[in-house]
Image (cartoon, rainbow, N blue to C red):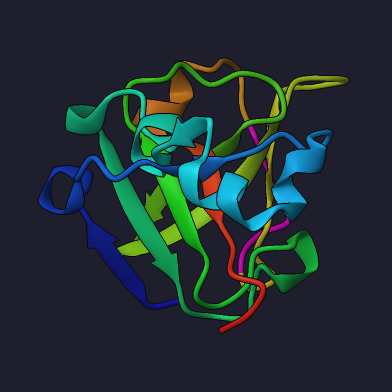
Amino acid sequence: MELSISRPDDLFTYRPVAFFNDTESSLLSSPSLVSGRQRLDLNLHCIKRPDDTFFVRISGLSMVDSGIRPGDILVVDRILAPKKGDLVVMMEQGEVVVYELQVKPELKLLSLSADHADRVDMESLSELQRMGQVGIVTSIIHHIRQ
């Protein structure tokens, strides 16, 4: 899988846009959409620690079965401690690999990529750093229409 990494601070801007909850009927009225009672900036929503966050653009098809497609962008936080169900980003032989962390019935990483080992068993979470953990996926930006 090819890898494209960029730092949020290179791209970080404050650009709030109109935001509505799915229960608001005012979404259908044009003047309301323009004025937008609430505003949301996706940078502030998706990135909690800009200095410790980076993006990974996915280019291969190896994670399609897990819902991650070419062009998707993973928002990765380097500081978060891993916990059950997290998507863990690892560097293995210069390549980015994404695993899902499972803790029961045993501690293991399940590969989301068809190109890599199905699972990696571990004794403790502290092994992740030694094994090449670079961060935890906090969000996935997935375009429906290209």
Q: Quick check: 104 above or below 143? A: above
Query: Residue 44 versus residue 128: which sits nearer the camera?
Result: 44
Residue at image position (26%, 61%) is 5
Q: Quick check: 40 above or below 94? A: above
Q: Which residues are magenta?
A: 116-121
Of all residues, the one furthest to the bottom in this rendering is 146
Please identify the quarter of the rendering in which residue 92 is found.
Answer: bottom left
Q: Is residue 134 visible?
A: no
Q: Left or right: 72 with respect to 47? A: right
The mark total stands at: 0
Residue at image position (23%, 40%) is 14
Q: Is residue 108 visible?
A: yes
Q: Quick check: 146 above or below 133? A: below
Q: Left or right: 108 with respect to 82? A: right
Query: Residue 9 versus residue 15: which sits nearer the camera?
Result: 15
Q: Is residue 117 magenta?
A: yes
Q: Position of residue 70 (x, y in %)?
A: 55, 78
Q: Quick check: 85 above or below 104? A: below
Q: Left or right: 78 with respect to 75? A: left
Please identify the quarter of the rendering in which residue 132 is found.
Answer: top left
Please identify the quarter of the rendering in which residue 56 is found.
Answer: bottom left
